[in-house]
Every structure is written in structure tokens, then in C-alpha cells.
Image (tube, rainbow, N blue to C red):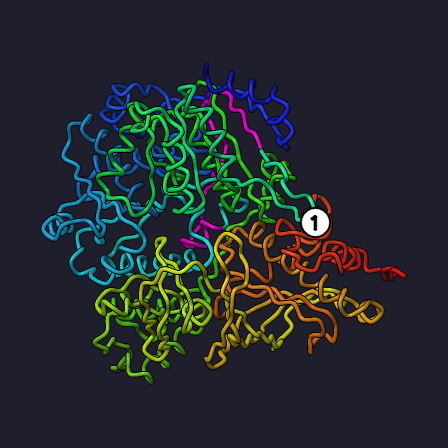
Amino acid sequence: MNAEQLINQLLEEPDFAASVTAYRALPARDGRYVGFPQALDQRLVDALERRGIHQLYSHQAEAIQHALSGRNPVIVTPTASGKTLCYNVPVVSSIMANSANRALYLFPTKALAQDQLAELQVLVESLGIELRSHTYDGDTPADARRAIRQAGHIVITNPDMLHTAILPHHTRWVRLFENLRYVVIDELHTYRGVFGSHVANVIRRLRRICNFYGSNPQFICCSATIANPAQLASNLIEGDVELVDQNGAPSGPKHVVLFNPPVVDRQLGIRRSAVLTARGIARSFINNGIQSIIFGRTRTAVEILLTYLRADAPDHRRDSIRGYRGGYLPQERRAIERGLRDGTVRAVVSTNALELGIDIGGLDACVLTGYPGTIASAWQQIGRAGRTSASSVAVLVASSTPLDQYVITHPEYIFDSSPETGLINADNLHILLSQIKCAAFELPFRDGDNFGRTDSTASFLEYLTEAGLLHRVQDSWHWMSESFPAEEISLRSASTDNVVIVDYERPTQVIGEIDRLSAPTWVHDEAIYLHGGVQYQVERLDLEEKKAYVRRVDVDYYTDAELAVKVNVLEVMGSDGQARSHGEVSVTYLPTIFKKIKFDSHENVGWGKIHLPEDTMHTRAYWLWLPTEVSERLPLKEVEVGLAGLANVLANLAPLYLMCDPRDLRVWPEVKAPFTGAPTIFLYDSIPGGIGFSTRLYDMHETLLRGAGDLVARCECAQGCPSCVGPQFDGAATSAKLQALRLLDVLLTARPLAVAS
């Protein structure tokens, strides 16, 4: 039985069909083909034809022509549409024309870089020319690094290595930077938020060094489908781009099923576990010999699913079911990838590590355990099955979270248009200051030099001079500190003040790190810190030394800290005068107490006080409030419950629309905010200085609220539950669900609501 036959059989089963919220049979698509551009070297054309490539897909030909003509193409087509050729062909062609030419490939993960190296080497071997391509990452041996710096035509790396190991040591890479012709940026959609804002500055540093050595490279970018690929690429490289988004690749028919596990407690709105549901569906595929991939949201979920599926399989099939995630050794991951391609691995359970374009052959079925967070990621994972002309199946199993429940009950969000926009703010003051330090270490700044799109470079240089990091000599600023700035600056955080977590009983053992803003609630004294499934108790948090000392324990509870937050509006930058505003704010937060929550039952089994000073962050926020004449007519308890419930919904939905990490945004409700004098919900960037999320939320105010209303109204619970307004322990007394809906009605219609008698 093939995948299409099996899904049709399952859809006829009443229990299965009852939980299907949407089913789409996407038809096969014929390919559109174009001949090779005349400018290509005939040897390259012959090599491609020997590999069975006699024509190009239309989008490949368009992208290659843009690159050969000196433009910066941005290719946005689905998984398995042949984007690799879009950059390999012009890069190899340029090196064949001039052996001095160089190229730099940037991939977000090591695994993807290794996979692309293998693909490139196959093409080079078929050409029979001397063209050296190498990966340069943390696993590259020291002697190999020297050879790559001197002789590598194509250097394949990641943004972190470019940031810490290549740009600061550019004098060792003279041949690369003097002759850099192309820079390839793959998986463009991953460069958003804080990470993308940092990488945009790394590209600024790259351009600055290239200019110093006399080169001016072109950029070729590839991305999954997002709302603003051209804008994101242009902001990232700060240059003009050409969008290529008309896919010419063929594909087989695909069957996509959205599956919402059945409710097991209607009063509380609790559904059957997504992990257990995915287990049953995946088992059906595996037992019918259908090669499958199962995605889990976390490493823990992957290991649990792998354990279940191996236990369900007969003895002779267990070794053909494998796990794949960060933490596995590189050799093990490569072996699994080969097994998927040659068919010896029949099922793989993976985190999003296999979401990106690693070649894993033509799988027949895909099961997503929970919505992966963005439409781009969802379609990347769905696209892992069906890489050939044969039919394929993908099943998205929803969890009980509000985000999952919104997506699963709004199939048009998955299948039709996506509102997701990749946002970056390369001129965020905290990020810019960090990156100017790195740039100054690499090359002196001179009077009139500008870094970024602001006029504040000179102010930054003066500030760093006063701090003793720079020294001015006539018209230039030179790095004077003994510190190495790039090593201290993470591309994943706006703050350089990360707190390292040290095993108290093994003082030299650092087990992890956490950003400074999160440390007071995650690693305060007596907190239970979970790492790799192991429990550690925090013995001491030393914020001055930026260290948390922990020891391993075995307890049956975890801790959850509570924050007292105060939001002060500093400047209103936009307002409709009635229900919404956005602007600059200061956020003061003080951890107060922590609760001990028992595993499994989630009972509160104790609490303790947190003794830490308050902290303040300046950022940007979007806030919405109820008219005073409405809120004053409602009982205080109803306002409190409704406001908290609505804040919970918005906290879950806003990252969906912003295409950002949920941790990049914080939500704080106030029953009577000092600034508005009314019940108010603040949504603020959790990044000092802000990235631009608040402005975007202000612009999509009505869309966001209508989405929240749909989610709450469609939820099958009675009073409110974790799938909508959050857990309700006193739901019988006051319905958070009802109150949240009433508040939404006011916010959307701007009319006073009737107060229940």
C-alpha cells in the first residue's frame, strides 16, 4: 500500500475523519523548462548533461541569468525545486573563466553546509577541473584551515564562523577577500529578528573588508516562502535585488491533512496528546512500509517518539527507525542521511534539524508533531516528503497550545496566503554598538566613515574611546583593548551579558548559558534548572560575575518564577487616539516569588521568595486599552479575568503573525495602567531598543484582534482552557473565555458593551 492509498483509507475511518479539520489534495505540477544561457562555458553545460540535466527549470535559468549579468537574485521556491544549481552554476562558471575568483557560501547549519559541499564536489568532479571547495567550521582541523585560507576557491561556512573566525582574521584571508566574486546566503528566511539583525551587520563588516581589499561581491540569496523576501534580502545585504519566485520545478501530487486530536475533557478543553496521536499515525505509515519522517518540536519530544515507535515496531524493523537532532555526532548524522537516501532507514524522527535543504532522498510521508512556529517552517517540513513525481502525504497534528489551535482551525492560514514577514533592525543601538566594536577591531575607522544607515557612527566611536576601547590618532580610531570583541558577542542575542551556568560540584564544567534578561526568572537561587532532561538546583546566582552555580539533583518538581512588571511610556510614536498606540517604553521588572510545580499533575507543592534587585530595560511597545467609560461599568473581577485571558491569547498569536521567536516578545496586562488610566495590554520587544515588532503589531491591530476572537470563540472548552485564554482554576466563578470575548467586542467595534445583570 502506498502513502496515497493509506491516507484515503484513514480518511474513511469515522474516528480519524472526525478529527480532520482540513484536507487538501494538491495536484501534480508539470515542470517548465528553459535552455542553458549562452554565456555558460560549454564544458559546464556538458558536465550537467552527463548528470542528466539537459535543461534548466525556468526559475533556475532566470536566477542564473541575473547572476551572470551582475545582479543580486533572490530565489524563493519550494523545497526540492533545485535552488542549489541557481548559485552553483554561476559560481563555478566564474571560477572557470578566472581561476583567481573566489566565492563564500553561508548556511545556517553545519549539516546543510556539509550536504551542499557534497553536491558541489559531484559537479566539480564531473567537470574534471581543479576547483577546491571546503567547509570551514568548528570541526575543521587546524592544518586544513591553513590550506583553505590559501587555496580554497569556494569557502562554505556559517554566519557565526564568519563573525568570529574569518572577518576578525581577514589578514589571513587576503586571497579570498581580494578576489571575492559571489556571496551565497541560503535559507534567507532564518535570518530574522535578533539573529538576522546581527547577520546584517556581519554583512556590513564583510563589505567593509572587501572594499579595503578592492573587491565588490555579488549576492545570491535563497529562501522559503515568506511575505517579504525581496525586502528582507535587500535589508540584509543593503543593496538592490531581483526577485525570482515563479517556480518551474515539477512535483507529484501531495495530500495534506490537518488533524486536531480529540477532546478528552470538554470542560477543561484538554485534548489527547499530540505526541501520542502522532505516534499512532506514524506507526500506520511505518507498518505499511512507507518511508517517513516525523518532526518533533523539541529534542525531548523526538526522543520520546523514537522510543515509542521502536517499541511498536517488530524486532527486524527497529534498526531502520532512527532519531536525528542536535547532539548526535556528525558521523552518525551523515550515516542517517545516507540511510534515508539508499532506503535502509525507513523512518526518521527529527527536530527541525532536517527541515532545511539537506538531501535525504524522496520520502513518501511526513508527520508534524505540533505546528513548527511559522508557515515557512511548516511548508519546509511538509516538503521533505514528495521530492519525486510520486504522490506523498503530510499530516500536521496539533497540540493544545493556542497557537496550534488557531492554525488547525484556520486552514486558510496554511493553504492560502501567509501574513508572515521577516523583520530585522540592523540599526538597533545595542546590536549596532556590538558590531561597531567588531568592525573597529578589524579595521580602523576614519573621520567620515559610516557604519549602517544612521549618522551616529561618530558618536559610537567617541563613546568607545571614552570607554578605553578605542584610541584616536589624527583622523582615525584604532582598537586598543586586549579583548577580542567577536568572541564576546553572540549573534543570537542583543545583549552581551549572558550568564553562564556552572556545575557547582565540577567547577570547570559549564553546562549552558542564558541571556541576562532571563536569568532572574530561570536561574535564581533555589530554582530548578532543566538541561538535557537532567535537573539542577541553583545554589547561587552571581549577576555581577555573570555566573549561576548549580548542582545536579533528583526531584519530582520544577520551578516557575513570577515577575512584578511596570511599563512606563516614554514617547508615543503613533496612536489612533481611541484604542491603540505604539512607542518607546521603559520596562522595570522584579522577580518576586517562585512556585514549585509537580511533574505530571502540575500541582503547586510549595513556593519561595526571590531576593534580587529590580532591573530596567528601554525598548518599544504596542499597547491597546479599553475605553474608561466601559471598564468602569464592569465588575473588577471580570475585567481582571478577561484582560489576563486576552493577554494570553495575544501572547501566543502575535509571534505567529510576526514570524518571530515567542521569546522575542513579552506581554503585560494592567487593570489600570498609569499612562492610559484604563485596562491596558502592553506587548513589548524583549530586546533592548526594540527590533520593530511593536510597530508591525500596531499596523495589524485589527487583524490580530480578529484572529484572537476567532481562536477563543472556536475553542470547544466551556469556561476557558490552555488552548485559548489559559488554564482556569476558578472558571466556574468567572468565565475568562466569556470576558475575553466581551473585551474583544469592545476593542473591535468601539461600542460600549451591555453589562450582564
Spot the residue most to the right: 757
**Up-down relation of residue 456 to residue 189 (above or below):** below
Q: Residues within 10 Å of mark 1 (few under 14, many from 20)?
A: many
**Up-down relation of residue 507 to residue 90 (above or below):** below
Q: Residue 613: horizontal and vertical position, in percent?
A: 47, 82
- Amino acid type of the residue that numbered disc 1 sits on in the rendered structure: Val
The answer to whether residue 522 is left or right of residue 326 is right
- Identify the residue at image location x=44%, y=30%: 59
What secondary structure is found at the residue carrying circle 1? helix
Q: Residue 265: horizontal and vertical position, in percent?
A: 65, 43
Q: Nearer the viewer, residue 122 or 317?
A: 317
Spot the residue most to the top: 1
- Identify the residue at image location x=53%, y=50%: 659
- Residue picked out by circle 1: 712
Residue 71 showing in the rendered view: no
The answer to whether residue 291 is left or right of residue 701 is left
Q: Give the extent of the magenta segment.
A: 232-258
- Identify the residue at image location x=23%, y=57%: 166
The answer to whether residue 297 is left or right of residue 273 is left
The answer to if 233 sits in the magenta stretch is: yes
